């Protein structure tokens, strides 16, 4: 199994040119010598490349999963056996095991934490403050995690500075949009092998992830409907050419539903009862709370696993609803998550956030920060370079023009 894992890690590395460049720099300069890092991330081939890069820079790492269904066991095994990285994660681990593994990671008393969804930070703050005595700071990968951390900051409960990696442009504009867009469709296809073309495809939420999913579903020939609560995002969806309506109306006509809102019970009992026989439901939001799974469990006359990652619920009204990946991140549970090409940018942000914390953490407050724009632009430039794309530069005349206000009509 570890041989397979290693091959997959190296395959992903081929598409992570920016991170590979940083890894070479880290190997030479050893900026993380003596640093202990506890990471709570999806244990994938891309994450493997990130932790290997940090290890090359001198860090000592522990890794646990940020979702019980996203761990690729062969990757975890290779990290342990081929790279000597301590991994506490298993595909299909129970909720208790999931939290025990977070605790094991934290017990190294890290200087820096990497989080995806803020579970590790929450556990540290709520139950194990003593594990945070050495902390310089943390990083956070995803929108949901940043929302939770900002709530901690507002209540003055945050114990150290955190870099919201999600809020770098080279993260959310690419990972959230193109990564979630493609990998969500990938997860639905691997789980169901259904035809997207001609289907009524309902996307709940039109943030960057929702935009990506809607765009890719349309690209595959679906008739796409968007549901939203935010009037500006709803208007964007309308002007992007999607039908926008309330979930109750969409529920009656949709064939495939994807939630990507970050909120709870977005598909609730009323919508579930209205759905057509055979409706397929998937979630690509961080937590498994967006579809009211409890209602399905408590109100079905029959429940069976019909394929791996597909659960059939027969409601009292006789209609069958198909829930993918238990309502957890379908792109990671039923597929492999975002492709390495986009994770290259997300994880270069993570790697440079660790370096930024190492260099500046002591001067930061217990707040949520975004990485400086120069770092964001550096990643974009390196990514373009790795793709062999050259762009123009401002001339002196143009720079001068942009910095003055005197030239008008
Ligand atoms: N989040 C989404 N896709 C991912 C991937 N491939 N690896 C790690 N985290 C992810």
Image (cartoon, helix red, strand yellow):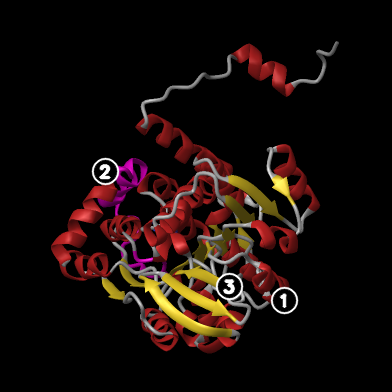
State yes or no: residue 103 in magenta. Answer: no
**Quarter of the rendering occupied by the C terminus:** top right
Closer to the eye: label 3 or 1:
3
Q: Which residues are magenta?
A: 14-43
Q: Is residue 386 rendered to the left or right of residue 302?
A: left
Q: Secondary structure at mark 1?
A: loop
- Marks 2/3 in contact by CB < 8 Å: the verdict is no
- Marks 3/1 in contact by CB < 8 Å: the verdict is no
- Which residue is at a point 65% across and 69% down the rendered structure image? 267
Residue 260: quadrant of the picture: bottom right
Front position in the image: 179 or 219: 219
- Which residue is at a point 36% across and 78% down the rendered structure image? 92
x then y, percent, for residue 277: 57, 67
x then y, percent, for residue 246: 76, 59
Q: Is residue 302 rendered to the left or right of residue 343?
A: right
Closer to the eye: label 1 or 2:
2
Q: Earlier in the sequence, mark 3 or mark 1?
A: 1
x then y, percent, for residue 351: 41, 54
State yes or no: residue 35 in magenta. Answer: yes
Q: Earlier in the sequence, mark 2 or mark 3?
A: 2
Q: Which residue is mark 3?
A: 319
Q: Which residue is mark 2?
A: 14
Q: Which residue is mark 1?
A: 155
Local packing at callout 1 (Cα closer than 10 Å; few below 14, some 14-19, many 20+) is few
Mark 3 vs mark 1, CA separation in Å: 45 Å
């Amino acid at each position: 199994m570890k041989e397979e894992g290693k091959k997959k890690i190296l395959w992903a590395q081929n598409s992570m040119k920016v991170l590979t460049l940083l890894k070479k720099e880290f190997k030479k300069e050893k900026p993380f010598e003596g640093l202990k890092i506890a990471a709570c991330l999806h244990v994938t081939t891309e994450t493997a490349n990130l932790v290997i890069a940090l290890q090359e820079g001198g860090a000592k790492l522990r890794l646990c999963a940020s979702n019980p269904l996203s761990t690729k066991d062969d990757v975890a095994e290779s990290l342990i056996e081929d790279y000597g990285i301590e991994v506490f994660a298993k595909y299909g681990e129970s909720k208790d095991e999931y939290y025990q593994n977070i605790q094991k990671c934290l017990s190294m008393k890290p200087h820096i934490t990497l989080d995806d969804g803020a579970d590790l930070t929450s556990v540290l703050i709520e139950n194990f403050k003593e594990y945070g005595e050495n902390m310089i700071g943390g990083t956070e990968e995803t929108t949901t995690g940043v929302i939770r951390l900002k709530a901690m900051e507002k209540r003055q409960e945050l114990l150290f500075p955190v870099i919201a990696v999600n809020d770098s442009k080279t993260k959310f504009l690419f990972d959230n949009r193109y990564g979630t867009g493609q990998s969500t469709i990938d997860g639905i296809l691997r789980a169901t092998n259904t035809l997207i073309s001609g289907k009524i495809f309902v996307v709940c939420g039109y943030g960057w992830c929702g935009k990506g999913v809607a765009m890719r579903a349309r690209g595959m020939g679906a008739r796409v409907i968007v549901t939203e609560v935010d009037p500006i995002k709803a208007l964007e969806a309308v002007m992007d050419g999607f039908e926008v309506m309330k979930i109750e109306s969409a529920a009656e006509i949709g064939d495939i539903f994807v939630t990507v809102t970050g909120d709870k019970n977005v598909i609730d009992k009323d919508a579930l009862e209205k759905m057509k026989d055979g409706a397929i439901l998937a979630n690509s939001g961080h937590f498994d709370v967006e579809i009211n799974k409890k209602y399905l469990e408590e109100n079905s006359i029959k429940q069976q696993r019909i394929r791996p990652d597909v659960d059939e619920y027969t409601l009292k009204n006789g209609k069958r609803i198909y829930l993918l990946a238990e309502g957890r991140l379908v792109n990671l549970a039923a597929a492999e998550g975002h492709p390495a090409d986009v994770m290259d940018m997300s994880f270069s942000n993570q790697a440079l956030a660790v370096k930024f914390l190492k260099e500046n953490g002591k001067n930061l407050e217990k707040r949520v920060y975004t990485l400086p724009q120069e770092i964001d632009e550096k990643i974009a430039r390196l990514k373009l370079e790795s793709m062999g794309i050259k762009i123009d530069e401002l001339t002196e005349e143009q720079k001068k023009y942009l910095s003055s206000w005197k030239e008008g009509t």
